[in-house]
Image: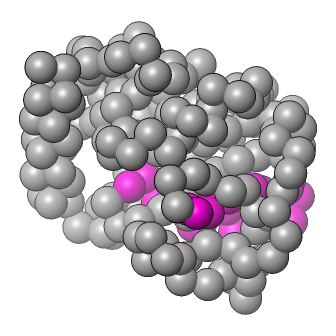
Amino acid sequence: MIDNKKSEIRNYIRELKKQFTLEEKKQKSEKVFKKLEQLDAFSKSKIIMAYWSMDDEVYTHDFILKWYIEKKIILPVVKGDELELKSFSGLNNLIKGESFGIEEPEGDIFDEPENIDLIIVPGIAFDKTNNRLGRGKAYYDKLLKSIKAKKIGVCFDFQLLDSVPVDKHDIKMDLVISEN
């Protein structure tokens, strides 16, 4: 039942995403990150975990390239059914990942997740009480349950719903930021 509802929302959001060009999504993403950069939690953070976005997600490339010299940026790398964390050190250090074809940093594993100050989390949908609906593989839920950093979900306005179905494994965000 709950899985059916999650699946319906994933399909609904997937169709909405198709209505926007990559350029439109980049413009919307810029608004999201302007809001994020205003937060104390961001300005005080030294180590930030983000994600290298796919075309249907809030676009993170410009944000990461803007900040990686000043702040340590950590990106997840899919390994089997887990996420490994690696430091981003520039575009020359990215290779195409095995699982989703997303570019991922190569190099040493970042093995100090307890030192991460802020995590920017993608999602298919979020709700007004900071619940998150992911892609269904639980990569982030497994990782986030053990990290104490502030968790900020980022999404387009149409991904922010009144409610999303949750189960006991789903990790709630501390804050969700959309474009408006």
Instruction: Identify the residue at image location x=34%, y=32%.
Output: 133
Left or right for 93, reference 51: right
Left or right for 48, reference 2: right
Can you name the residue that lies furthest to the bottom here?
92
Q: Magenta stretch: residue 93 in it? A: no
Q: In this view of the protein, can residue 45 be seen by the observer? A: no
Left or right for 12, reference 155: left
Q: Start and end of the magenta stretch?
A: 57-79
User: The N terminus lies in which quarter of the figure?
Assistant: top left
Instruction: Identify the residue at image location x=44%, y=39%.
Output: 138
Q: Quadrant of residue 71?
A: bottom right
Q: How many marks?
A: 0
Task: Choose between 87 and 60: the one closer to the eye.
Answer: 87
Q: Magenta stretch: residue 66 in it? A: yes
Q: Position of residue 137 (x, y in %)?
A: 39, 45
Q: In this view of the protein, can residue 121 be seen by the observer? A: yes
Task: Choose between 39 and 161: the one closer to the eye.
Answer: 161
Q: Position of residue 79 (x, y in %)?
A: 58, 63
Q: Position of residue 66 (x, y in %)?
A: 72, 64
The image shows residue 119, relative to residue 100, as above or below, that is above
Task: Choose between 32 and 4: the one closer to the eye.
Answer: 4
The image shows residue 138, relative to residue 92, as above or below, that is above
Instruction: Identify the residue at image location x=73%, y=30%.
Output: 147
Instruction: Identify the residue at image location x=44%, y=23%.
Output: 170
Can you name the residue that lies furthest to the top here?
129
User: The C terminus lies in which quarter of the figure?
Assistant: top left
Q: Position of residue 151 (x, y in %)?
A: 63, 29
Can you name the residue that lies furthest to the front here?
80
Left or right for 18, reference 52: left
